[in-house]
């Protein structure tokens, strides 16, 4: 070595310098990491051991207008497993399956299938007590996380309106979907330490608190909702109908007080859910309204000044020719005044008014009261129907539209139109939310005209010969219009044996508060007229709703006073 050092002194010195330099660099790096760049080591260490576990946010409460809960979130326990760790505890699989309420053979097959995964759901949505029973078994590889599950106290009664969430607590239907961001809240974060196998070592701290979702107060009154649900269901059973809808609106505020549909479903148990039962028919199904459009044709006539309630109209001989088509009444009603046209539901009467004033005026009237127009509710899947744009309508187009064919509407739109009549001709926007103040209105009808039409609608219900007598409410003046609509059949044309029964009305007539529409789809037990099928439902529901709203009766019989004879005093 001495000889080599002597022969090559520069090589020795070079190696020595390199070794000293490397030792110095290492020493400096150690000092730098521990003193000057301490955060680097901490970040690297944390990256291998510190984890952030999400803290689920409590979804906002949905209530009715009186604070009654319609959708609430309850804490649940979700159990998950580490497939690799569970492979080492095969002897306890049957015990775990029994505790989870699962079939042992299928459970074992699922664990085998996920043997290489570090995360798999075992079961979701257990109550905290059920989850703790499984955790107490201390099976290796079984862990728990906290979640929330949505529960719907009103069940099927408000299902179509409220909707539901999925297993991850995200809105999937109805209000839950439309206001998902408002209700969802913001998840938080919890900082924990885990080992390389993912096992929890220490719960360090909450790095971000969960922010609960906001509460949503709907416009519906749950008491009216239950009442409407019961009566609509009873009607479907009584008449063997396919489906039905009922909508009630506060005429002054535009708030929807009740909205029910049949068939319905239970959002708390969706295992055997049929897609058809999920449709909010009041907003999604469109139909030709039929005779309930006639009051607006008459309103157009009164508004023009060419007609008055007592204007005489000749409907003889019960039919009339319009182009190549024939318009018919059910009977030959002879000579009627305008009130009689509504009372008897004369097609010929309203056709004469519509043809006299023209299709453009008819289109304008129906558009202004909201038929075939966007309601602005923003409900998922809501349809706006179809009110054909006016061009130059043929006389027959104007004629059929005057008695409710050739256009399509939803039950909500039709209710809105009748609310205009009940609100002195002023249109206010509809709302599914509870309102603290009355919204701005737009005057679309002369108040005197709307009052005259309401009296005609009262004649339909209260006077002898009216088609809506079964909608009467004892103690209250009620007005409305019946409709019996032929349904369109496949291949075109109208079916002769399938109908939609409709009743639309307002109460009380002296000071209107509620507008409501009842639609019964395909009654099949021999009775299908709107006055026989839909009107009784309207009457029963309206009677209860007026009392729930503490509306004073306006049609009580006069009090009979009986004179009491004077008592003559006897002599003592």
Image: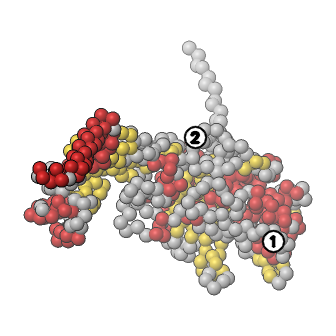
Which of the pair 374/555 is nearer the observer? 374
Is 434 above or below relative to 472? Answer: above
Mark 2 element type: loop
Mark 1 element type: helix
Q: Residue at 66% x, 41% y: name it.
A: 438
Which of the pair 240/399 is nearer the observer? 399
Residue 486 x %, y %: 65, 75
- Marks 2,1: beta carbons within 8 A: no
Q: Which residue is mark 2?
A: 550
Is 426 above or below relative to 346? Answer: above
Q: Residue at 53% x, 75% y: name it.
A: 524
Residue 479 x %, y %: 68, 54
Residue 419 x %, y %: 68, 52
Q: Residues under labels 2 and 1: Cα distance?
A: 42 Å
Whether residue 193 is visible, yes or no, is no
Numbered mark located on residue 398 in the image: 1
Whether residue 80 is visible, yes or no, is yes
Q: Mark 1, residues whose alpha carbon is within 10 Å: few (<14), some, or many (≥20)?
A: many
**Colouring scheme applied when the structure was drawn:** secondary structure
Q: Residue at 23% x, 47% y: name it.
A: 13
Q: Nearer the viewer, mark 2 or mark 1?
A: 1
Question: Which residue is most to the top?
Answer: 572
Q: Is residue 85 left or right of residue 145?
A: left
Residue 458 x %, y %: 71, 54
Which of the pair 489/9 is nearer the observer? 9
Please report whichever mark, 2 or 1, sits nearer to the chain's N-terminal start. Answer: 1
Is 319 above or below relative to 59? Answer: below
Q: Is residue 321 left or right of residue 125?
A: right
Question: Which residue is most to the right?
Answer: 306
Q: Residue at 15% x, 54% y: name it.
A: 4
């Amino acid at each position: 070595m001495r000889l080599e050092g002597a022969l090559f002194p520069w090589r020795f010195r070079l190696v020595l310098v390199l070794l000293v330099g490397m030792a110095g660099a290492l020493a400096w790096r150690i000092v730098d990491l521990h003193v000057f760049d301490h955060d680097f080591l901490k970040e690297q260490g944390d990256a291998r051991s510190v984890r952030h576990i999400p803290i689920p946010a409590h979804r906002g409460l949905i209530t009715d207008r009186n604070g009654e809960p319609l959708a609430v979130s309850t804490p649940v326990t979700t159990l998950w497993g580490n497939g690799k760790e569970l492979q080492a505890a095969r002897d306890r699989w049957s015990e775990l399956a029994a505790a989870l309420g699962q079939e042992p053979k299928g459970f074992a097959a699922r664990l085998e299938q996920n043997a290489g995964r570090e995360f798999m759901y075992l079961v979701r949505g257990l109550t905290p007590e059920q989850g703790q029973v499984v955790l107490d078994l201390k099976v290796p590889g079984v862990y728990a996380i906290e979640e929330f599950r949505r529960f719907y106290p009103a069940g099927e009664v408000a299902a179509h309106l409220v909707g539901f969430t999925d297993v991850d607590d995200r809105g999937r239907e109805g209000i839950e979907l439309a206001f998902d961001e408002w209700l969802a809240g913001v998840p938080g974060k919890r900082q924990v330490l885990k080992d390389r196998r993912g096992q929890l070592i220490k719960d360090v701290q909450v790095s971000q608190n969960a922010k609960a979702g906001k509460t949503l107060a709907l416009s519906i009154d749950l008491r009216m909702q239950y009442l409407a649900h019961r009566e609509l269901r009873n009607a479907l059973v009584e008449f063997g109908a396919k489906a039905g809808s009922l909508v009630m609106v506060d005429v002054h505020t535009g708030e929807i007080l009740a909205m029910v549909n049949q068939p319905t479903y239970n959002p708390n148990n969706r295992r055997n859910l049929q897609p058809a039962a999920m449709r909010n028919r009041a907003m999604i199904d469109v139909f030709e309204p039929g005779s309930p459009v006639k009051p607006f044709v008459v309103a157009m006539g009164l508004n023009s000044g060419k007609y008055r309630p007592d204007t005489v109209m000749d409907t003889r001989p019960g039919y009339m020719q319009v182009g190549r088509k024939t318009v018919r009444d059910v009977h030959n009603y002879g000579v009627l005044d305008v009130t009689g046209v509504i009372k008897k539901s004369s097609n010929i009467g309203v056709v004469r008014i519509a043809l006299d004033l023209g299709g453009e005026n008819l289109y304008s009237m129906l558009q202004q009261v909201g038929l075939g127009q966007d309601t602005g509710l923003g409900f998922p899947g809501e349809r706006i129907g179809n009110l054909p744009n006016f061009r130059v309508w043929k006389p027959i187009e104007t004629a059929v539209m005057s008695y409710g064919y050739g256009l399509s509407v939803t039950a909500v739109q039709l209710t809105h139109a009748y609310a205009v009549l009940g609100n002195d001709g002023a249109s206010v926007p509809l709302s599914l939310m509870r309102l603290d103040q009355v919204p701005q209105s737009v005057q679309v009808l002369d108040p005197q005209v709307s009052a005259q039409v309401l009296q005609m609608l009262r004649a339909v219900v209260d006077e002898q010969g009216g088609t809506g007598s079964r909608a009467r409410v004892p103690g209250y003046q009620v007005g409305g219009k019946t409709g019996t609509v032929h349904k369109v059949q496949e291949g075109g044309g109208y079916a002769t044996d399938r109908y939609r029964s409709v009743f639309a009305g307002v109460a009380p007539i002296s000071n209107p508060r509620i507008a409501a529409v009842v639609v019964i789809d395909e009654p099949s037990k021999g009775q299908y007229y709107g006055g026989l099928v839909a009107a009784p439902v309207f009457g029963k529901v309206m009677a209860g709703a007026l009392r729930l709203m503490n509306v004073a009766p306006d049609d009580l019989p006069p009090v009979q006073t009986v004179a009491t004879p004077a008592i003559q005093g006897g002599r003592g």
